[in-house]
Amino acid sequence: MTTLGTANADPGEMDTGRLSVGEARDGSEVGLPVAVINGSRDGKTLYMQAVSDGDELNGLGVLQRLVPQLDPAELAGEILIVGIVNYYGFQVAEHRNPIDDTKLNRAYPGDSSGTASERIAAATFDAASRADLVLDLHQGSTSCMINETRVRCGSRHRLHRDCLELAKVFGCGHILDQKGPDGQLARAAPDEGIPTIDPELGGAVGWDEESIQKGVKGVFNVLHYYGFLDGDIERQPQTRASSFEQHGAPAGGLVSFRVDLGDEVERGDTLFEVTDPFGTVKAEVTADSKGVFWRHRRLPQVATGEYVCSVGTDIDQF
């Protein structure tokens, strides 16, 4: 039997339930929504989670569309899923956990006796530690971003090759291969010997269907490649960036972009202009290096020095 929280499934079955992580301010139990899918045949274990940042919903959209398509009778191995990790942030559509003002994906591996975020991290990390592979589904918050997969363990980590292979299989088209901050699940799980990636499925307010479908396809790629489901996948070329260059506004005003997300840029190419309310150009910002236009702010208004966009650099393809 496969168990996660109150969800229990015998071979060939699926179940949903709740994973207790403490109590809310009114004393009611807080339980994260979970699902377990126990295949009819032996195999690996995959752990997936979404919404560790409370306003990043595309990963939840992936799970909401993916799970009904999975038949335990056709599956080898087990799938463990936590649908909404940052319970408190999700309720109020905020990135951080408002109970302790914490970015939850900086709290891993967690502490079962710690803050609200540390307790959630500990409970979900315990579930992730049972797996052979981990997918931590994210998006670029509410900014505009390409679809990418992040390898966060660092190039010198003993599991770097395995994590990079998992990212290639997921197949978003772009990979950021850069060591992440302490406390990320994609940093902590590889230390326990578990290949882990952090798909960043675009950026949106609410759900973006194109990014969600890329995520669904990516999960199916993983399920086929690693033997959970029968069948082969068609590998697509991936573009990898190993670093970012960030650009801020040299003047206050309104931003007009001169390139689109995913475009290749050369040093000196114009990325954006800042104008006054009547269209007079106040400043022009150009790329410092060759790269890919990776991410930009959603709203056009900026103050001097405010973040505007990022270019992925140190590019290669494979």
Image: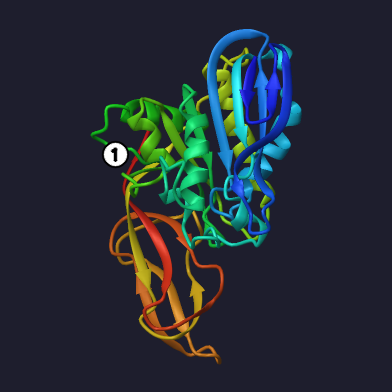
Q: Residue placed at 50% from the left, 26% from the top? A: 235
In this orientation, does residue 85 appear?
A: yes
Q: Position of residue 96 (x, y in %)?
A: 52, 59
The residue lying toward the viewer, choosing from 283 and 118, is: 118
Question: Disc 1 residue type?
Answer: Gly
Q: Position of residue 301 (x, y in %)?
A: 52, 80
The image quadrant that residue 178 belongs to is top left
Q: Which quadrant: the N terminus?
A: top right
Q: Which residue is under mark 1?
A: 154
Residue most extreme to the top? 41
Packing grade of label 1 (10 A; few <14, some 14-19, many >=20) is: some
Q: Is residue 66 left or right of residue 203?
A: right
Q: Residue placed at 57% from the left, 56% from the top? A: 203
Q: Secondary structure at mark 1?
A: loop
Residue most extreme to the front? 27
Against 103, residue 233 (above or below) is above
